Amino acid sequence: MRRSLLLLTAATTALVLTALLVPLTLLTRTHAADRTTAEATARAQWVAHAIGPALATPDERETAEQTVESVNTQAIPATSLVLADDTVIGPSPQHHGKSHITDAIRLARTGRAFTYEPSTGGRQVLVPVQGAAGGTAVVQVTLTERQLYAGTMTSWLVLAGIGVGLVLIGLLLADRLGARLVGATRRLARTADRLAAGDLTARATPEGPPELRLVAGQLNHLATRIDELLTAERENAADLAHRLRTPVAALRLDAETLRDTEEAHRIAADVAALERSVDDVIRKARRPLRDAPHADLAAVARERAEFWQPLAEDQGRTTQTSTPHEPTPVPVPQDDLTAAIDALIGNVLDHTPQGTPFRIAVRTGGTTPTGHAELTVADEGPGLPPTYAAERGTSGGGSTGLGLDIARRTAEDAGGTFAIASDATRGTRVTLTFPHTPPPPPAETRPAPPEPTG
């Protein structure tokens, strides 16, 4: 828009200046010619008046020659005197001495003073000298094209400079106006981008022309309304999930009263999975949308490995944890990342024989896709059963099938990937890939939010 405004201003200013300056340049040319002709006419009349008495006496011809010679200096129009016997005193357009007498000179000898433009170019001023001995003499002032339009080029250059200056001033004003419009539009777009990214605290500053101020006001109103609606939706979801806790607790108690132990354990596992899902809904519903999620993948992996270490030792398992020393920030809430790692480690502990070793690794840099961090949880167990299907709620190992789905959703919601490889000789390997975000600015350390309780 800024460039278009500059081009429009330049084109409009150029057209207006052309319409004004072209007639003005022609007028300066005409004015220069008229001014030079007037000066030449005044000189011819003065010469005619000065040498008139001298020409009345034949012996005073020398005085007339001196007068003509005195007015013929360099850089001024040539002045000559044509006597009645056709003798030319001073410079002649043809040659000194006898000159070809033109019709214009013959006409001037009749007593008429006039100006005319010969076919050779330029202009001539003819003034008769009455009372000369032997007949009427004629004072002739010859103007060349260069003398006739002297100063015109300077005037044109001045006009051209004025025109260029006006165009530059117009472009400068248009550029400032364009910068103001473009700046206001870009700031409005940045506010819209922040709102699209989930920052509902973003507000636009009404500035610029009335139309942009109106759009900014409506955008702020829309942001406020969205914030209100999302808050209401989060509260409704949290309340609904919380109300589900009571019937879920009743189901758990009913499951414990079953006489069939195997059936009781299976139903209890399903109820526990349902409880975790309800808790997950409550946590996500209460999380402010405007907070930019982030967590240190390496730190969380080390912390969860230490948390599960006692249970792994009880089962006779050897563990190996490999993480970088520097922070590895990823765009995932810490509680979600913790839940995903717990789900993967829990699968190893629950569905591989006791004594099966496993390892946890976090990698960044050249071994991973550019700008990504990678989490791997691998075991040396018998691998997944042939009937395994990577679908939510489906498992071939007697579980609810939600653990791997939680890990998959955590990675994919952050813009990453989920991959699983398994065979009977090398065990199972689950890899989560996350975008590697810049480290967040320093902030006050806050404790992790407590688990929702009934």
Image (cartoon, rainbow, N blue to C red):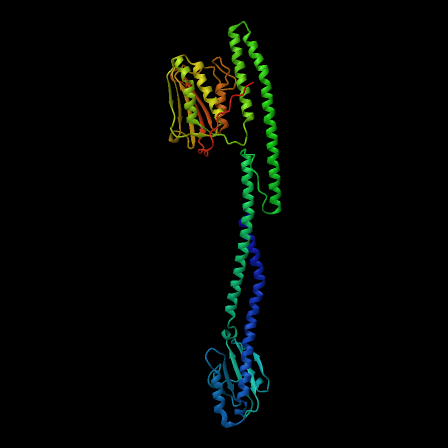
Q: Which of 64 and 81 is in front in this view?
A: 64
Percent across and percent down for residue 409 are 50, 24
Pick the front one: 220 or 396: 220
The location of residue 276, given as percent across then percent down, is 52, 18
Q: Can residue 429 be seen in this view?
A: no
**Residue 104's image quarter?**
bottom right
Between 253 and 430, the one lying in front of the other is: 253
Give the side of residue 419 with respect to residue 250, left or right: left
Coordinates of residue 258 in the picture (x, y in percent): 55, 6
Q: Quadrant location of the C terminus?
A: top right
Is residue 42 shown to the viewer in this render? Answer: yes
> What is the number of callouts on the image?
0
**89 to 373, vertically: above or below:** below
Above or below for 2 versus 342: below
Q: Which residue lies furthest to the top in this view?
A: 259
Left-right relation of 321 to 58: left
Expressed as whole percent of the image width and height from the top left, the position of residue 446 reads 48, 28
